[in-house]
Amino acid sequence: MHASTLTCTRITDIGFGRIQAVFSAEIAPRAGQFFLLQTAPSDTTALLHRETVYPFAITPAGFTLEFQPGNIPATLVPNATFDALGPFGHPYQFAARQPRILLIADQNPAPLFALADAAIAQRGEVMLLLGQPYPVRTLRPEIEVQIGHLPKLFSQTQTWADAVFTTTEQTFPQAKRLFSGSLPCGIGACHACYVRTPQGAVLACKKGPWLAVAPD
């Protein structure tokens, strides 16, 4: 288990109540991985106050995190430091050399952004389907955005994509879904993220957090 200190170097209010914060980091994650960030004061039970966060805009020196309304740490200010564990999870690699990826989100698109960055780095194409308004002006210009009824948008675009990823609870054929349950330890010790997939039962913190959805 890797413990590290993250230092906030810049904060941007992007609108819609959302904040993006840039952090310097001792260990750079890879696309699809996550950290467990301590957001509570150090005199509390730290393990009960770790938030699962998904970095994007990753560089060797650090990365960006996005915080939604009602989930912004009270201590988030420039130069603030946070204890973190990670990175955890299985880094995602695209099978296609120049992948065409379809990203689907309703309330929380931020975990998808690292996948978009990775696909663009491979000269791929990215389309983002949104079910709710979002400050799209903050997104990379290479990302094509459509906003509306997600099942309808998906039916119009699914044959275009080499890979599909979603942060929603809706089921989209062939999509990999972000695990939405608790990831308390990140190393599989607690078995809290035991989940059923078409390939059998796995621990989401080890094989995920992007997993194929098992049929009901």
Image: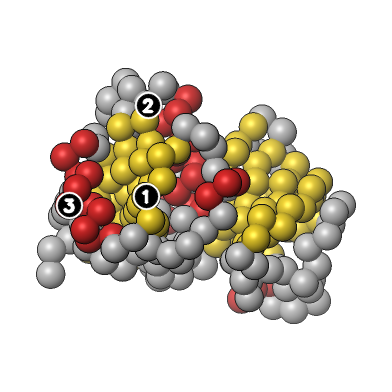
Q: Earlier in the sequence, mark 2 or mark 3?
A: 2
Badge 3 crowding class, 10 Å Cα cut-off, few under 14, some 14 to 19, many 20 or more, is few
Q: Position of residue 86 (x, y in %)?
A: 59, 50
Q: Nearer the viewer, residue 60 or 104?
A: 104
Badge 1 crowding class, 10 Å Cα cut-off, few under 14, some 14 to 19, many 20 or more, is some
Amino acid at circle 3? Ser
Dot 1 lies on which element?
strand
Q: How far, Cα to Cα, is label 2 from label 3?
A: 21 Å
Q: Nearer the viewer, residue 68 or 39?
A: 68
Q: Is residue 6 left or right of residue 184?
A: right
Q: Residue at x 52, y 58 (%)?
A: 134
Q: Residue at x 53, y 50 (%)?
A: 136
| Disc number for residue 155 | 3
Amino acid at circle 2? Gly
Q: Earlier in the sequence, mark 2 or mark 1?
A: 2
Q: How far, Cα to Cα, is label 1 from label 3?
A: 13 Å
Q: Quadrant of the C terminus?
A: bottom left
What residue did someone put label 2 on? 124
